[in-house]
């Protein structure tokens, strides 16, 4: 182990001032590295450096002399261990030289031996509508660990928030401890390679060469904003305690607003998930090295944050089959129920395990859209809680209840949405915007439309009534139609709940379903498909003795019966007005003179209900031999003119 005499290590004294550079890191650079979410970035009103030496070189560039504050793409540049949680860079703060962290030989700013080596930045933001919390990610590393734990050399990282509720310190580890050398949980399972904190012990430690420093790993802090606050100020600070040496550094990234509603600040371990299949990925490690493993498939990139205070003894058998969770270490872990997650494959809910109330929250980067109520539902998702078939506790964005109607599940007759897998009945501590999938009703509940007496070219308008609960507000509603045409079904999309088209003759149907789209045009809810039958008439052909192919040869000495049927809606239509024309050599005849006897006093067909047929007895004695065209027309254009050729001899 190292000796604990520290005074001889204070080799560099005095605050060193350096001339500025055109490439120096600026306040704007720090702001852009700290804040990646566009909505949050637009609400930053100021960022200041309050203490510490700001690098006079560009991001990732060692200025050649000690500096405490800069912008980095990794700690240290070129490394792969400590990386940004979002975007391409983060803000780095240090009590020593960021680019050359050290134990003995560490730079001591200010008064020799005094604990005055603090690096501090402050950022102030306007609070946008709907933002109920603010979150940030950090990682703390220190050379004071492990041999000076319990001493007064208690280096620290703090984050304070100031809003209308006052000022409070919110930086904690995953177990609620302050982020100091004496209290924070330094995760022994984490790598230090390439960070500058990976120097091995300079004296025997009873083990193979071992790292002589500690690291918290990436932690996410989620802080409630006091209701009514219009601005919020956060101050991030890292510094020495007890003396001015042995470097401690912190990186801060991904400051963003959130719509999550909490009562107290919470800090948790964050695991970055990338698309693909994962197997046995450790997602949480407690103070004695026990951990949870996650197995599953990630559909899109995101972050999985585990908020916890204390791990309780829970056997691995307590995890449901297929949950994707298993216990590492000595089976001390927290009880979860894992559900499918929209966007990732993972969505989690919380159950209590004795003294433990631990939750998994998927924190997907993006702005919060406070356009509707917030729900605490069993099928919570990253962007919307679907409460189509599951009851939900719901509040509006102003904190008032949504109303009792939302507490009742939809009718059991509604089909389950296969894209949402629901778990047990936990009590969630995260609120998210909610919706109920749309329910469509066609034509006041009708299942078919009687169009048996409409004209051939008449259009029809089909209107749907879409019911949402609660109202989706600024969610986009899109209707997907399948419409029948003479050439076959055609798919089309509308933003209005109706469509107008000309249906083909005969029986057909139009179908439609509704989709709810969020601001990113992602589908967050889908209705069941509903259909309505459309019944237009159809001419089903001439009857014996006339052949529909024009091959009929008829005796001109006898009456020629012209017969046909019209079908619609599964039966025959007998109340249409059909008229007969006869043409030979371009000469058209019509009227009662064509009728045999008094059977048809004019050109109109009679309907024989017993045979379900229209009939006109054509007087053939006046017809000279030759080729004739029989033509049938319908009043009102219900059906197109239909003709057939006959040969009279």
Image (tube, rainbow, N blue to C red):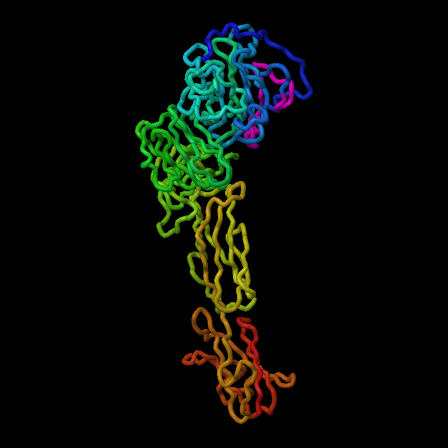
Task: Kindly tell me whether residue 530 is visible in this rendering.
Answer: yes
Q: Is residue 625 above or below residue 423?
A: below
Q: Quadrant of residue 17?
A: top right
Q: What is the number of callouts on the image?
A: 0
From this viewpoint, which residue is outermost toward the left? 354
Residue 210, image x and y in percent? Answer: 46, 20
- Whether the magenta-drawn stretch holds residue 246 is answered as no
Residue 395, image x and y in percent? Answer: 41, 35
Q: Quadrant of residue 646?
A: bottom right
From this viewpoint, which residue is outermost toward the bottom? 557
Residue 280, image x and y in percent? Answer: 42, 36
Residue closest to the eye, 495 or 114: 114
Residue closest to the eye, 386 or 496: 386
Task: Kindly tell me whether residue 227 is visible in this rendering.
Answer: no
Residue closest to the eye, 2 or 631: 2
Q: Quadrant of residue 46?
A: top right
Residue closest to the eye, 136 or 498: 136
Q: Is residue 559 above or below residue 107?
A: below
Q: Identify the residue at image location x=50%, y=58%.
A: 462
Residue 421, image x and y in percent? Answer: 40, 44
Magenta segment range?
Answer: 33-61
Left or right of 223: which side holds 423?
Answer: left
Quarter of the image with the N terminus in it: top left
Left or right of 67: which side holds 332?
Answer: left
């Amino acid at each position: 182990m190292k000796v604990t005499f520290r005074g001889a290590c204070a080799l560099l004294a005095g605050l060193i001032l350096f001339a500025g550079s055109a490439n120096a890191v600026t306040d704007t650079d720090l702001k852009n590295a700290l804040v990646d979410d566009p909505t949050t970035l637009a609400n930053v009103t100021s960022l200041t450096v309050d203490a510490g030496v700001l690098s006079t070189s560009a991001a990732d560039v060692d200025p050649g002399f000690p500096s405490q504050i800069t912008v980095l793409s990794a700690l240290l540049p070129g490394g792969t261990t400590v990386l940004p949680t979002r975007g391409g860079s983060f803000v780095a703060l240090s009590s020593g030289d960021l680019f050359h962290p050290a134990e003995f030989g560490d730079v001591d700013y200010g008064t020799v031996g005094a604990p005055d080596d603090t690096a501090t930045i402050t950022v102030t933001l306007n609070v946008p509508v709907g933002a109920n919390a603010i979150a940030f990610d950090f990682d703390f590393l220190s050379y004071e660990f492990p041999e000076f734990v319990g001493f007064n050399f208690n280096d620290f990282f703090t984050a304070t928030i100031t809003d209308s509720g006052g000022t409070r310190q919110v930086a904690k580890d995953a177990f609620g401890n302050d982020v100091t050398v004496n209290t924070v949980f330094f995760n022994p399972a984490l790598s230090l390679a390439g960070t500058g904190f990976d120097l091995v012990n300079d004296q025997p430690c009873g083990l193979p060469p071992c790292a002589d420093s500690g690291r918290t790993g990436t932690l996410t802090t989620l802080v409630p904003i006091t209701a009514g606050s219009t601005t919020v100020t956060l101050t991030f600070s890292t510094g020495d305690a007890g003396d001015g040496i042995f470097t401690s550094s912190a990186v801060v990234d991904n400051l963003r607003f959130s719509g999550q509603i909490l009562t107290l600040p919470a800090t948790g371990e964050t695991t970055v998930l990338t698309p693909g299949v994962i197997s046995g990925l450790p997602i949480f490690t407690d103070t004695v090295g026990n951990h949870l493993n996650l197995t599953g498939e990630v559909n899109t990139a995101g972050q999985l944050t585990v908020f916890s205070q204390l791990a309780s003894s829970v056997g691995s058998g307590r995890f449901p089959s297929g949950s994707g969770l298993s216990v590492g270490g000595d089976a001390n872990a927290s009880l979860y129920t894992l559900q499918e997650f929209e966007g990732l494959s993972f969505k989690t809910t919380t159950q209590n395990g004795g003294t433990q109330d631990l939750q998994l929250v998927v924190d997907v980067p993006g702005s919060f859209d406070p356009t509707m109520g917030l729900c605490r539902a069993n099928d919570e998702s990253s962007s919307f809680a679907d409460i189509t078939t599951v009851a939900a506790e719901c509040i509006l964005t102003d904190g008032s209840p949504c109303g009792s109607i939302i507490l009742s599940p939809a009718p059991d007759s509604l089909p389950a949405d296969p894209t949402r897998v629901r778990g047990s009945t936990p009590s969630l501590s995260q609120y998210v915007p909610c919706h109920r999938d749309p329910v469509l009703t066609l034509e006041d509940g009708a299942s078919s439309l009687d169009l048996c007496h409409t004209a051939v070219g008449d259009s029809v308008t089909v209107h749907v009534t879409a019911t949402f609960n609660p109202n989706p507000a600024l969610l986009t509603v899109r209707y997907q139609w399948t419409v029948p045409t003479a050439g076959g079904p055609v798919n089309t999309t509308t933003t209005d709940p109706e469509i107008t088209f000309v249906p083909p003759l005969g029986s057909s149907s139009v179908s439609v379903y509704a989709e709810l789209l969020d601001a990113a045009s992602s589908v967050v809810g889908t209705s069941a498909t509903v259909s309505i039958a459309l019944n237009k008439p159809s001419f089903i052909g001439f009857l014996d003795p006339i052949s529909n192919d024009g091959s009929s040869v008829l005796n001109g000495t006898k009456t020629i019966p012209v017969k046909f049927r019209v079908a619609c809606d599964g039966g025959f239509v007998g109340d249409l007005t059909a008229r007969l024309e006869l043409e030979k050599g371009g000469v058209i005849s019509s009227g009662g003179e064509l009728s045999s006897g008094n059977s048809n006093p004019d050109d109109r067909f009679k309907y024989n209900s017993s045979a379900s047929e229209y009939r006109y007895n054509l007087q053939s004695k006046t017809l000279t031999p030759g080729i004739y065209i029989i033509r049938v027309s319908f009043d009102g254009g219900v059906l197109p003119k239909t003709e057939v050729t006959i040969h009279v001899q």
